[in-house]
Image: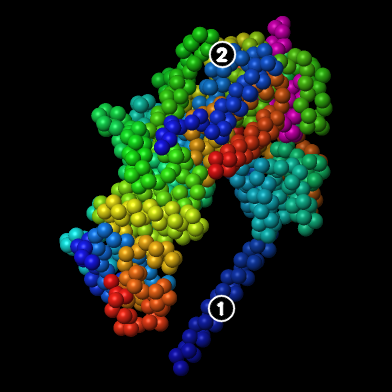
Amino acid sequence: MDTSKSKLPPIGQLGPFIALFIACAFFAITTDHFFSGGNLSLILQQVMVVGVIAIGQTLIILTAGIDLSCGMVMALGSIVMTKLVADMGVPVPIAVLAGIGVTALFGLLNGLLVTRIKLPPFIVTLGTFNIAFAITQLYSGAQTVTELPDSMTWLGNTFALGSAQVSYGVVLMIALYLGAWFWLRETGAGRHVYAVGNNPEATRLVGIPTERVLLGVYVLAGVFYGIASLLAVARTGVGDPNAGQTENLDAITAVVLGGTSLFGGRGVILGSLAGAVVVGVLRNGLTLMGVSSVYQVLVTGILVILAVTVDQLSRKASR
Amino acid sequence: MTRFPAAPTAARLAALAAALAASAFAAQAADEPVIGLITKTETNPFFVKMKEGAAEAAKAKGAKLLTGAGKTDGDNAGQVTAMENMIAGGAKTILITPSDSKAILPAIKKARDKGVMVIALDSPTDPADGTDALFATDNYKAGVLIGQYAKAALGAKPAKIVMLDLFPGHPVGAQRHNGFLKGFGLPAPDAKTNELGKDAAIVCMADSFGDRAKGQTAMENCLQKAPDVTVVYTINEPAAAGAYNALKKAGKEKGVVIVSVDGGCEGVANVGKGVITATSQQYPLKMAAMGVEAGVDYAKTGKKVSGYTDTGVTLIAANAVAGVESKDVKTGTELCWGKK
Amino acid sequence: MATQPLVMQAKGLVKRYGQVTALDGADFELRAGEILAVIGDNGAGKSSLIKALSGATIPDEGEIQLDGRTIRFKNPMDARRAGIECCYQDLAVAPAMTITENLFLGREMRRDGFLGNVLRMLDKKKMLETAVARMADLKVGIRSMTQAVETLSGGQRQCVAVARAAAFAEHVVILDEPTAALGVKEGNMVLELIRRVRDKGLPVILISHNMPHVFEIADRIHVARLGKRAAILNPKKISMSDTVAVMTGAMPPEQIPAECLA
């Protein structure tokens, strides 16, 4: 019997990396400033917030769910953290944990509504998206929170790596991606996430606690949104109540570009990182070329369609 | 048998209800002018201030104010619904900051056909005569003022300008952008176009979407292309704050002139802190108050306002420069909108 | 023929769903080393019977015994722990995952030591080897255990599902319509596999509407009717049409000739 090891990953999984490579090659050729250590590490910094949000979003999409509230919950997290420090003098580590606690709680809320009340994730997160936004605006009084201590924005600082200035937040993002990748690939709990997304009835029948897996995924995603809140604070230096408004779709775009199927059960999480970086590369490269941002939106849209099409075709071909 | 004793009670109740309805009708008919204010969103401090101003003016003049808004910037349908509800609720004047300058026109026309006076606040419809009148900042002038200031503040240094705009096609974005170019002394398109003017002195143009984080990203990208930037034009104060952050990270924040438009209290505070060099302050409160006055007038005399009324713009700067009139941060703070 | 010992037995099972009585005092017997087909018209109570035996429902009255001991299953997990494995009609496989992963779904093996206990890493190599061995044991002819289940044909998928049940069952294997929607060749492939499962010593309960298949592999046939057991028939002695008659009630149990009973 043939016990061949897993072959090269299918084109659907390599797609985002190929797209990233092509985009980088294109801009390296057409502009002077794109291909430098400094510029490339800058792009990573610019995508680190969406990048970490996309980890949570990937987990949820793998279970055939979706989370429209991610950006708003992230904004709420940053406001909670920063206001605790700025208004009440809470020590930074505790404030950060409190912020992550709040975002995890929203994850729990989403998860409970999906698993206990059995509402579709789209509807649930549409509701919590509005609730999170309202709470953020009310709690912050629509005021930006400034005058934060350096220890809070430390993740935004950089260290030199050759000609590049790498930010600690980017290192954290990459570490989180590698951790999530390991968990999804090598542990039973991670494989169960795929199984639940692929066939929830089957997982129920074989005795996997499907509800618990789903709940866990939503809460875990909430934790990642909380970490993204801290990264947002580190990057901009403030708690901004108006942040996160486009991050919902940005994160979903990154996940789709990364090759994860919206129907659940399929996808490699590292693809989401590539997806997030591709968007950053487009934005950066087109600005350097002096091209209007409208084209960035156009190219992103085309890439999304391509990504979904490639995924569909590669699945059909494997039959 | 038991039904009959109830009849007198029922009759008494009916009479009471009729009397109440009549008195309510009478109160309504005592002609408290009903004015509707529809903003783009509920939460942007600019519109919060507008609502406050309108509420105060309404109270002072004995008018009834209905308020509503879209859910997000660009939510046209939400504004249309609000307008329909307000007119059904008796509003004879509608004040609106249109989210979509074209899409709102059919709803406005319907309202005007019913005899409702519609005044645009802060930004015009497209075309501007879609409404009876417009009370707004002269956004072009706002741009001109900061352009003049930037030129003067720059002095002898070479002009390497980075422009952080809103997003393509937005009339306010275009007016401020082109006004800036004009004030700076560069060839600029006039106030009527939605196209963004270009010039050799502009080393980078990027879209900030009026957002702090996106403004920072846009500035970072432009710095890669043009590390020797000397002037940064920004569409509004959050974008300016983001741009300052990017410059600070690159160690370049000193010696770069950053100008902006808005005059919100946070922005003025940033001028005081040296984050923004100068900003054009606009007056949402005034727009709203004028709008309420016009509404009350219309209800009392049947006379409509028309045309464009400039609600004023003032340059606020920490340091005055020769040849350009500006007010200091203290004055700016007194006049600012938002939470002080 | 020497009577084999009873592996599983049920007496007087009653199950009501509101006004409907699905099981009305049903009896059941499964002997070691046999394939017992359970047949019955719709509403005869065969699915309720199977659900009671596999722990998916709890009967209102009655008693179930496994290997002589009375058992009470509260959920399917209890039944699995007791060594009863079910292969469901909709297969319960995750199509995008590999055959190995599906085989071990819910019972994954972890590595030893730190990697397994702390990092909770799966022992993919061991699972693959075990999968290969079990499938070879049952002579299932699929080339690679690492291909996704969705790349298999319908019959191969059924074989994987049946093999999974057989690989982990210790006492009883229950198969629900295993040859439904399969063509002739694929259906025969599955039947062959079921025979091999029985030959390895596991008794099989087979629910099926497919009379020819039932007659091909069943050792005995349990006929369910009106929530009870109508009869146990010997497929070697009774004809297919008479069996259908018993099933529909056209032939009442008293009329069945003695040699057709099993």
Q: Secondary structure at mark 2?
A: helix
- Give the quadrant of residue B252: top right
| Amino acid type, mark 1 | Ala
Range of residues picked out in magenta? B153-181
Labelled disc at residue B14: 1
Labelled disc at residue A38: 2
Residue A282 vertical placement versus B6 (above, below): above
Give neighbour class at mark 1: few <14, some 14-19, many 20+ (Cα, 10 Å). Answer: few
User: Residue drawn 38% across and 52% down?
Assistant: C193
The quadrant of the image that shows the C terminus of chain A is top right
- Give the quadrant of residue A148: top left
* Percent position of residue A111, x then y: 42, 46
Mark 2 belongs to which subunit? A
Residue B13 vertical placement versus B311 (above, below): below
User: Residue drawn 36% across and 55% down?
Assistant: C194
User: Residue drawn 36% across and 34% down?
Assistant: C124
* Percent position of residue C63, x then y: 22, 68
Residue C179 vertical placement versus A262 (above, below): below
